[in-house]
Amino acid sequence: MKVEITPANLNGTVKIPPSKSISHRAIIAASLAQGESIIENIIMSKDINATCDAMKKLGATITIIDEIKDRKTLIIKGGLSKGKEPIEIDSNESGSTLRFLIPIGSISNRKIIFTGRGKLVERPLDEYYKIFDEQKISYKNNNGNLPLTLEGCIKPGKYRIKGDISSQFISGLMFVLPLLEGDSTIEIDGVLESKGYVNMTIDVLRQFGVEIINKEDKVFTIKGLQKYISRRYKAEGDFSQAAFWLVAGAIGGEITCEDINIDSLQGDKEIIEIMKKMKADIRIVGKDKITVKKSQTYSLDIDGSQIPDIIPILSVLGALSEGKSSVYNALRLRIKESDRIKSTTSELTKLGSLIDEKKDGLTVQGKKYLDGGNVTSWNDHRIAMSMAIASIRCKDKITIEGAESVEKSYPNFWNDFKNLGGKLEIKE
C-alpha cells in the first residue's frame, strides 16, 4: 500500500490507543489466571492478535466484545490446557509474543513449535538457548532462526541475564518463574536497559496477584508457587504512539493527546522530558492530557538505551530542530522490525535530511524544512508513522511505500492522521 501525503499542519485532539506493551502483558497474565478476567480498552493490532491466538492455543478462552469504534473488551478465562499433542504458535512479526511465550510454552508439558514472519524469523534468542543448554531442555531451530521446536520445562533457580539485551527475555521469565515449585532470582549482568519495560511487567503481574521484588534493577527475587488472580483491568494509553502526535504538534500545529496516564511507568513517557529539553511548547493538562503547540525546537543528545521505540520519531524532531542532535547507546535498534538506525537514516536522507548513521546511533543536523519525495517503511510500523509526521515540514509531497505496516501496532493511524487535518491519498 502506498500513501501520498501533501504537507499540512495537524491540529486537534486525538485519543491515544492503548499501550501495546501493557496489552500483551495483561492478556498473558489473565490467560494464566484461574477464573474470568475482563480486559478493557484493547485494539486488536496484528501483534495483539498474535498473542491472543497463542494464549488460546495454550488453553485460554478469549471472547472479544465490541466497544467504542476500534476499542475492544476481552473476556478471558485462563488456564493452561493439559493435552499432549504438539502446538504450533505463530508469532507473526511480534517479538513480544515470541519472547514472552517461549518460557510459558516450556511449562505446557508438550512439544511447542514457534514460527514467525519477516525480520522476527532471525531476531536473536540466544539468551533462551543458553538457558535451555544449561537446563538440558530439548530444542532445535533452523541455524539459529525460526522455527523453534521446544520440549521440556524451565526450572526454578538463579538466572543471570545480560542487561544490554532485550528486556523481553527478562519479562518472559517473570511470567513463568512465579508458577514453579521453587524460588528463583534473576541477576542482571551490567546495566539494565529498557528498565521501564521490566517495571511495567512487574506492575502488571502485581495487579494480577503475583509479586516480584526488584532490588535496584540488579536482582529480581521471585517466590515460587504463586497464583495469578483474575480481575478487571483497563489498558492505559501508549506513550510510544503518543510520541508521533506530540512531535507533530511541535513541528506544525497544535495537538492534544487524550487518554494518556501522566503517572505511567512506561519508559517512553520520557518523550515529555526530552521535548521540554528541546524547548517544545508542551503542557500537561490534568492526569490524562498533553497539549503541544508549534515550537522552535533545539538540538539534543539523546541516550537511546531506555527508549528504543521512540528514536525514529525523535530523529524526525531532531531533523527539524536548530542545531545538531545525536542519538547514542542505541545499538539494539538494529534488531527491531527493521534495522532502525539504518532505516531511519536512509529514509530521512531521501527526504533531504542531513543525517549520518553511527554504529550505535546517528547524528542529524537540523533544517527548517525537508524536501519530500519517495520513501519506504521497511515493513516497520514506526518508520512508516515517522515518515508521515515528517511530511508536515516537507516542501513537496511525500509517498510512503509499505504504509500498511502500521497495522502491526496502530491500525487506525491513517484515519487519525486524516482526522487531524492530514492530506492523505491512498495510491494502491
Image: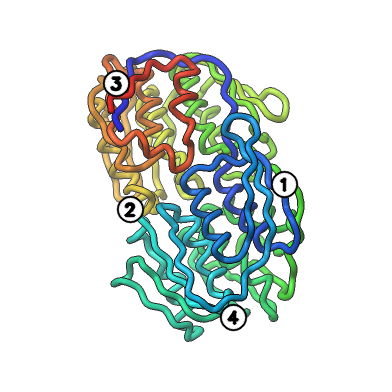
- Name which residue type carries label 2: Gly
Q: Nearer the viewer, mark 3 or mark 1?
A: 1
Cα separation between marks 3 and 2? 30 Å
Q: Nearer the viewer, mark 3 or mark 4?
A: 4
Local secondary structure at mark 1: strand
- Name which residue type carries label 1: Tyr
Q: How is the image coloured?
A: rainbow
Q: Which mark is residue 155?
A: 4
Where in the figure is residue 203, as x and y percent of width and height?
A: 69, 53
Cβ atoms at labels 3 and 1 below 8 Å apart = no
- Name which residue type carries label 4: Lys
Cβ atoms at labels 2 and 1 below 8 Å apart = no
Q: Decide: few, some or many residues near mark 4? Use Cα within 10 Å; few <14, some 14-19, many ≥20.
A: some
Which residue is label 2 attached to? 118
Look at the picture and state if 383 lies above or below 25. above
Quadrant, the N terminus: top left
Q: Which mark is residue 401?
A: none
Q: Residue at x 44, y 43 (%)?
A: 408
Cα separation between marks 4 and 1? 30 Å
Which residue is label 1 attached to? 233
